[in-house]
Amino acid sequence: MTANPDWRRAALVLVGHGSTRNRFSRIPTERLADALRQRELFAEVHACFWKEPPLAATFLDRVSAAEIYVVPNFAGAGILTGEQIPQAMGLTGPLTVRDGRRIHYAEPVGSHPRIPGLALRRVAAIVEANRLPAAEVCLLLIGHGSRRPGVSSATVEATAARLAELCPWQVKTAYLEQAPRVADWPALTDRPYVVAAPLLIAEGLHGSEDLPPLFGLERGHAGPASVAGRTAWLCRGIGSDPEIAEIILDRISRGTT
């Protein structure tokens, strides 16, 4: 991608979820910021977080540039990215002009149209390496979900629909905080091989602690494991994929005013 010349005088601010309970949650966002900083496309590149310091709510006061691009490094659209984060940061829409500064607010990383292809390649690598028959494979796409009704599952369902068009495997969805729940995955598919692909940015509490036992795995292991009469694998969160950096650049070049 050719950089917009204005980026050399602009700031990029990545907003991650963060966690007060798991120190690994911030790592993908920090690594992305480091990688993009090294490319010297922007005058400033920063990482801040919703749940831990440096907090997104007050972070813009620390940015020097007059042109700022804010990208939520989240796995999909929801109440946090659509309402709570912009409100906390004092943003009024895709473009906020305030105190002589132009602040662009992009759509979240996880709802980008390149995400299904990214997930597809990860699962295909496991299927091909293990020579699994396509008709016997289930791709289980895992989202966070929400206890509150709303749009939190929309990104996961849209991604799953696109994956069903692209791949020869069965595609199912499950969630951490709404039905159908990940813990009930054996009832969702009768396929003997299950590749679980979390649509989560970070390993974090969910990816590193909550999910592995559900697939017969120990922390840090990807599989295979024998569980519930099946053979299962668990992919890492999408935030570790190098393509996310390109998705972020595409977000700010196409998705902001």
Image (cartoon, helix red, strand yellow):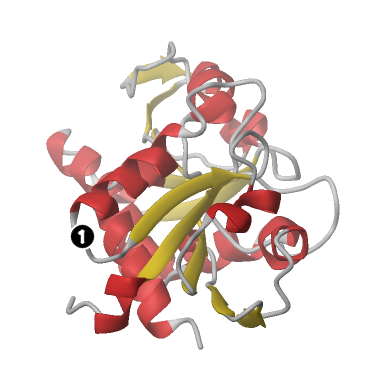
Q: Residue at x 71, y 56 (%)?
A: 80
SS at mark 1?
A: loop
Can you identify the residue that label 1 sits on?
40
**Is residue 174 depicted above or below 153 in this figure?**
above
Task: Please name the residue shown 59% across and 22% down the image.
Answer: 210
Farthest residue toward the right?
Answer: 148
Along the line of sight, the residue nearer the viewer: 231 or 120: 120
Query: Foreground residue, 95 or 83?
Result: 95
Position in image of residue 255 (x %, y %) = 46, 81
Q: Position of residue 209 (x, y in %)?
A: 55, 18
Can residue 213 be seen in this snapshot? Answer: yes
Determine whether 166 is above or below 203 in the image: below
- Determine the image quadrant of residue 42: bottom left
The quarter of the rendered structure image containing the N terminus is: bottom left
User: Can residue 199 be seen?
Assistant: no
Q: Residue at x 63, y 30 (%)?
A: 19
Q: Is residue 216 depicted above or below 110 in this figure?
A: above
